[in-house]
Image (cartoon, grey):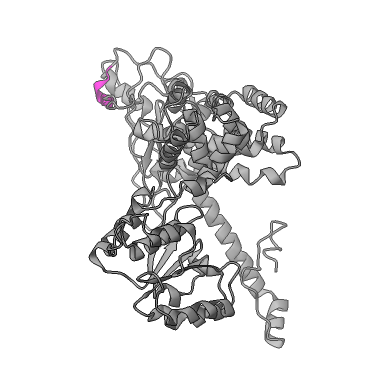
Amino acid sequence: MSYLVLARKYRPKTFAEMVGQEHVVQALGNALRARRLHHAYLFTGTRGVGKTTVSRILAKSLNCTGPDGQGDITDTPCGVCDACREIDAGRFVDYTELDAASNRGVDEVQTLLEQAIYKPVQGRFKVFMIDEVHMLTNTAFNAMLKTLEEPPEYLKFVLATTDPQKVPVTVLSRCLQFNLRPMAPQTVAEHLQRVLQTEGIAADTGAVRLLARAARGSMRDALSLTDQAIAYGGGRLSEAAVRQMLGVVETAPVLTLLEALAARDAAALVAQVDAMREHGVAPAAVLEELAGTLQRLAVRQWTGQAPADDGGDEDGARLDALATALAPDVTQLLYSLCLHGRAELGLAPDEYAALTMVLLRALAFTPDSPAQKKSLTPATEPAPGGSPPSLPPAAAVAPATVEPPTAPMPGPDGPLAAPATGAAVPGPAIEPATPAETPPWDDAAPTPTPAPAPAPASASASASASLSVSIPESSQALADAWERLVDALEAAGRIQALVRELALQSVLVARSPAVWRLRVPQATLAQGTARERLRAVLADHLGFGPGWCLETEVGPAPDAPAERRAAARRARQAAAEAAIQADPLVQALMRDWDATLVAGSIQPVDEGPADAGTV
């Protein structure tokens, strides 16, 4: 007796045996019990999810006569009557399956429709099943429209397709449509376990889980891969053999790569890639396993538990450690880089070099680790989950003696006064910037403010301290100073990626010896990692001490360097367009030859004031 493959041997015979399509089973079962039967059904879905199987079970339900030959329409066909057995065997005369992939012309459809005028020979209903119906030609679709809309009462149409977008709307509107969903890996794995137990084949849990993932939602593919794995493993399914058969990368090296990324260890990263090259591991498989592992990490980070298809493997401890070491936003970034990196492998002359570049790119764009962020957190930064520390008002800080500042503290636009060694510094209370200049629309002359008289020896120390740090500056002056500082940092290559974007999109609104405050238009720009890295760069560049803080607030920032650059580009573009419009030659061409300027073709150049634009 010839061997029957698992996909055919374990094809469901009743609705109760269907796996993963409960929504379709429930709808059809209720319709059969209530005798509310449509004349045409359309089953859609990817390969191997049960479209043809549902069609055969529906045909058996319509024609089943029961074990005693007295049965009626039912949602639980008996499987022993003549109609059920012959439909399963594919020889029931009133059930016709047409493969539209190879019979797509109008002649084949007309031959099928010619049988519609004859009543059933054996059963209650004729059932015409057209598989891959989207492959029919337009003429064939048109030929069946009338019969599909008003068939005889004994005729039922069942259409199946993997691409419903190619089915004409005139056909869709005549059918009751059911979408069969791809099955979850956990559902596929549970069914494979039952099949293997019935077959008496020993299988590792990890091997079954790998087969379920490789099936991509198709039960038929899962059973076919299981057949192949049984043959490959000599009657036993071990995880190592299945992994080698499928070409799936082992989890341990992938976790080593992620640990190197979390530790920002480029040498370990490159060494692990070299080791994979020596073992012949496919770079595409590495990125695919990386993406899958990062997805499971993201689930652990946001839910606090392993995914349903994770299986509780022995790598759970390492995954939990990585879930803690990597920030959730970093996990999302790495996942995106791995997905896009797969498309670049074929473009590089060496796939392993491309894999190395993808991982190094992930290292370059990955923000600092939590440990590094903790080391960069200033003393006034609130602890995670805690309330921010209360800061005393400036007047409440009253040191015994205050000496005048002996050395200026560097700032982006000149010296910034700072107290001398041993002088007490008030808390990071920021005084709002006050206008230093009269607005151009104000005709009144500014009233000069008399300089404060020197404080006597008996003056309060708090007043002296207040005078030493109160540096009112205009918003314009602060914005100009911040722009020059950002330009210098950018020219020196000290700010990149997210840190550079934060600096360009923000504007300095207040500053004191202890605290600077930036205003950003979006809260996402000022996330902790980018802000702390910018704080570290500024502190190093300006020579501030470790206690110096950088604060952010959310609000409009029209004077940000990025906005100023955009305004300058628009001004240069407008000047270039005006220069071209005013050019005598251009005006002559437009007047004499009815010429027109092509929109968007004018671009400003920087060669000199005479060359304001070009076409």
Above or below: residue 446 compared with residue 584: above
* Apparent side of residue 197 relative to residue 261 in the rendered image (left or right): left
Most foreground residue, 256 or 442: 256
Where is residue 391, by image quadrant?
top left
Where is residue 111, by image quadrant?
bottom right
Q: Residue at x 41, y 74 (%)?
A: 121
The extreme front residue here reads 68
The extreme right residue here reads 349
Figure label count: 0
* Apparent side of residue 598 relative to residue 411 in the rendered image (left or right): right
Most foreground residue, 363 or 44: 44
Q: Position of residue 351 (x, y in %)?
A: 71, 38
Name the image quarter holding the N terminus.
top right
Q: Position of residue 222 (x, y in %)?
A: 51, 43
Specify start and end residues of the magenta stretch as a single range.
391-398
Q: Is residue 552 magenta?
A: no
Above or below: residue 510 compared with residue 125: above
- Would you say residue 580 is visible in this rendering? yes
Most foreground residue, 12 or 209: 12
Q: Position of residue 231 (x, y in %)?
A: 60, 35
